[in-house]
Image: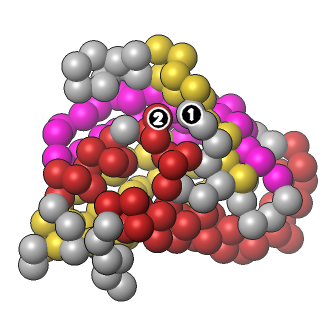
Amino acid sequence: MADYNFLTVWKFDAPLEKVYNAIHNADDYHQWWKGQSKVETIKRGNELGVGAVKKFRTRSVLPYTLTYTGTVLEVEPLKKVVGTTTGELEGRGTWVFETENEMAVVKYYWVVKTNSVIMNFLAPVMKPIFEWNHDVVMKWGAEGLAKYLGCNLVE
């Protein structure tokens, strides 16, 4: 299995609450995040979303789609959402939400490994390409969210 450790940072000139709500509502990712299929809710969580289980299908620049299930473990509204994934991507992700100079700042920490036989076979040579591919998909998310919210992505 190939292990990956990612940190993605997005900055928007938008209210933190709008950004948080859009990211926390994974059911709508397909509306704004290129490469995301409609999310399937397997189990609803509590009033904060803790315990929610959702199935994701993510298409990338490279010619493959990854299927994985996400479970929300912890939610601190407007501050943090923590979850795990199983399936073709297995790991732990943490969304952190902050305000900095009146901008909404989102940091996504993801420690993940691949369970795809083909990806693991190719990882010794392709790992840098897979990492680049992840960055592209995350860039699609940032650009799509900015358009969806009608705000600017600050680089």
- Outermost left residue: 101
> Does residue 37 appear to the left or right of 27 in the view shown?
right
What is the quadrant of residue 16 in the picture? bottom left
Q: Residue at x 18, y 38 (%)?
A: 76
Locate residue 2, reporting x and y percent.
Answer: 72, 53
Nearer to the camera, 7 or 133: 133
Locate residue 138, reporting x and y percent.
Answer: 53, 64
Locate residue 18, reporting x and y percent.
Answer: 22, 53
Q: Which residue is mark 1?
A: 39
- Outermost bottom residue: 155
Tag 2 near tag 1, CB within 8 Å: yes
> Label for residue 54?
none
The chief SS type of the magenta part is strand
Q: Which residues are magenta?
A: 64-91
Q: Which residue is mark 2?
A: 27
Task: Kindly tell me whether residue 24 is visible in this rendering.
Answer: yes
Q: Residue at x 60, y 58 (%)?
A: 34
* Sequence-earlier tag: 2 or 1: 2
Identity, as a three-letter code, of the amino acid under mark 1: Val
What is the quadrant of residue 4 in the picture? bottom right
